[in-house]
Image (spheres, grey):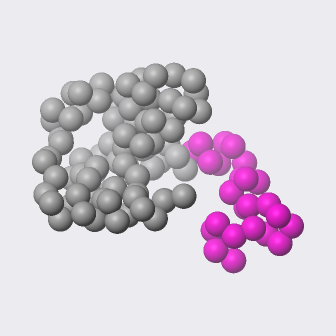
Amino acid sequence: MSCSEDRGDGTDALDTLDDAVAAAAFRRLVRLLRHRHDAANIDLMGLAGFCRNCLGDWIAEAGGIDKETGRAIIHGMPAAEWKARYHVTATPEQLRRMEESMAKNP
């Protein structure tokens, strides 16, 4: 059974995951992304179809807060500061990969 398949009873195993476990895994992911500044958002988008900003936007949407606050939670600093420190200009190839990857998203 893949991670996204239902369990045969119409439920997705992800939906039955304990919230504390899910939160711990999420925090670990965010801390890894905060540490790995070398993993550029454009490359994350090209490989996985999401990036740090997406995570921040999802937090904002789920929590009823503004996007800048959600992004700051993920970046560990205001998004503008993170961008000034770590943002790299995307190459045409990176943009192409991102567009292809995003097209695969639900």
The quadrant of the image that shows the N terminus is bottom right
Q: How many marks?
A: 0
The residue shown at (57%, 24%) is: 64
The quadrant where residue 82 appears: top left
Left or right: 27 as drawn, with respect to 16 = left
Left or right: 13 as drawn, with respect to 81 = right
- Comparing 23 with 84, the one in front is 84
- Comparing 102 with 44, the one in front is 102
- Comparing 20 with 102, the one in front is 102
The answer to whether residue 9 shows anywhere in this view is yes
The answer to whether residue 48 shows anywhere in this view is no
The residue shown at (45%, 42%) is: 55
Whole-percent x, y for residue 59 in the image: 51, 34
The quadrant of the image that shows the C terminus is bottom right
Q: Residue furthest right?
A: 9
The quadrant where residue 92 appears: bottom left
The quadrant where residue 73 appears: top left
Residue 22 forms part of the magenta stretch: yes
Residue interval drawn in magenta: 1-24
Whole-percent x, y for residue 84 in the image: 15, 32
Q: Residue furthest bottom?
A: 1
The residue shown at (47%, 48%) is: 28
Left or right: 77 as drawn, with respect to 84 = right
The residue shown at (21%, 61%) is: 94
Q: Is residue 41 above or below residue 47?
A: above
Q: Is residue 65 above or below residue 92?
A: above
